[in-house]
Image (spheres, helix red, strand yellow):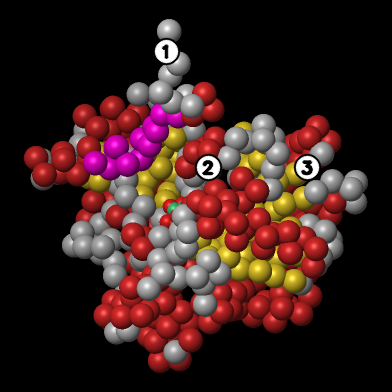
Amino acid sequence: MKKSIVGSHAEYKQLESNILQISQEAKEQKRKYEDVIDATVGMLHHENGDVFKFEVVEKALKNLTDEDMYNYASVRGKKTFTEGVLDWVFDDNAKMIREDFKYSIIPTTGGSAAISNTFYNFNDFGQKILLPNYYWSPYNNFALEANVKLETYDMYDDIGRFNVPAFRKKAFALAKEQGRLCTLINDPCNNPTGLCLEKEDWVEVIKILNEIDEMDIPVILIHDIAYIDYQMKDVNYSRETFSTYKDLNEDILTVVIFSGSKSFSLYGFRVGAQIGISKSQKVIDNFTRVGDYSVRGRFSSVSQPGMNVIDNIFNQKNLKKRYNEELADARKILKDRAALFLKEADRIGLEILPYCGGFFISMLTDNKNIFNDLKKDHAFVIPMQGLIRVAISSLPLVDIPELVRKLKKHI
Ligand SMILES: Cc1ncc(COP(=O)(O)O)c(C=O)c1O
C-alpha cells in the first residue's frame, strides 16, 4: 500500500478553528435575519459595525515612501521600530529594562509568530508548556506545530483571583519532570476571560520562577500582552506590573509578545515582535541567534509598511499624541460596552467571570449544547473550555441587553 501523501509528523493536522467558522456562520445568518447578534469577532468595531480604524494609522500608511512601502524589510527590522516597541511596551519601566537587562527585539508576523517561534525554539520536542486552563485556543496550533504540548493549571482560586498556589504546584512539578519550565501568561486582560493579575501576583510568579531557576533548570517566561492597551483600570496600571521583572534571576529568559493587531487595528498587516529580556548576555545572544534564524526560515521578514507605520507613530511626536487620543476613544468604546454588559448581567443575575479589560467577557456554563441553543435564538458567541466567550469588541451597545437576556436563558 502506498504511504500517505502527508508526512507522518503532519498526519494529526486538522484545523479546527471554530472561531473563524462560527464568525463566518454568524455573518451569513446576519445577512438573512435582522435580529442576529454576532459577538464572535475579536476586532474592535464601531457601533455602526465598521471596523475601528485609527485615522493616524491610515494617514501614516498613505504617506509612506515607495521604499518604506514596497521594499523587503530586513530580518531585524529598523532600530527605530524595535526601540520604539520597547518604549511603547514598557513606558516608565523602559529605562529599568535598558539598565538592568540585556535585550533583543525580533520582529515577527504578528504576535502569533512571536509565540509560535518561542514555543519552537525554547523547548525540546515533546515537552510541555505551562499555561492556565482558560486560554486563547490557537496556542494549541502553535504548540502542535512546534512539536510540544500544553499543560494547564486552574487559573482561578476560590475567590476568582489568579491562582498562585495552582501555578506554583504545576510549575514545580513540570520543571522537575522535564528539566525545563516554559510558561505562558496572557496578561493583562486574558483572552477569553478578561482576568488581570494583580501586581502582587506577578511578584509571586517571579519568586516561583526564581526558585526554579535556582534548581539549575532553564526557565522561560512568555508574557503575552496582546490586550495591554485595553485594560480598564488606570492607563498606567498594565505597565506597572513590569517593575516586578526587576527581581528576575540572571539566567531567566522573558519573552514579551508584542502585537500590532489590537493596539493599532493593523490586524491584517501581521506585525508583532518577540522582546527577549534577560540579565544574562549569553541567554540573549542565544535568543537572538535562534530567533533570527526562525524568522528567515519560517516567514523571511515582516510587513515593511506595517512596521513603518508603527515606527513613524512611535517616533513622531505629533503622530504619537494623535494616536494616544484615538486609543483613548477606542478604550472608551470598549469601556461603555463592558459597563453596560456588567450592569445588565448584574440586573438579571447572569454570573460572569471577573473582567478587567480586553475584547472579551466570559461566563462558565454546564450546558454542552449552549452554542446551538443560542444559535437557534439568533445569538452567536464562541464556546470554549467550559465557558462561552462574548466579543464585546464587535458587539454594539444596542444588542447588549438582549444578548445578556439570551445568555441567562440558556446558560
Ligand atoms: C491572546 C492573544 N495573543 C496574541 C494574539 C496575536 O495576535 P496577532 O497575531 O494578530 O498579533 C491574539 C490575537 O487574537 C490574542 O488574542
> Nearer the N terminus, badge 1 or badge 2?
1
Q: Residue at x 53, y 38 (%)?
A: 145
Q: Secondary structure at mark 3?
A: loop
What segment is highlighted magenta in the picture?
A: 12-24
User: Between 224 and 117, which is closer to the camera in this rendering?
Assistant: 117
Q: Quadrant of the C terminus?
A: top left
> Nearer the N terminus, badge 3 or badge 1?
1
**Label 1, label 2: how far apart the Cα atoms are:** 30 Å
Q: Quadrant of the N terminus?
A: top left
Q: Residue at x 72, y 52 (%)?
A: 220
Q: Secondary structure at mark 2?
A: helix
Q: Would you name the residue on which mark 2 appears?
A: 142
User: Between 310 and 35, which is closer to the camera in this rendering?
Assistant: 310
Q: Specify the label residue 180 is tagged with.
A: 3
Picture coordinates of residue 250 (x, y %)? 84, 63
Q: Badge 1 local density, few (<14 within 10 Å), some, or many (20+)?
A: few
Q: Secondary structure at mark 1?
A: loop
Q: Would you name the residue on which mark 1 appears?
A: 2
**Label 3, label 2: how far apart the Cα atoms are:** 19 Å
Picture coordinates of residue 114 (x, y %)? 54, 56
Picture coordinates of residue 164 (x, y %)? 73, 46
> Nearer the N terminus, badge 3 or badge 2?
2
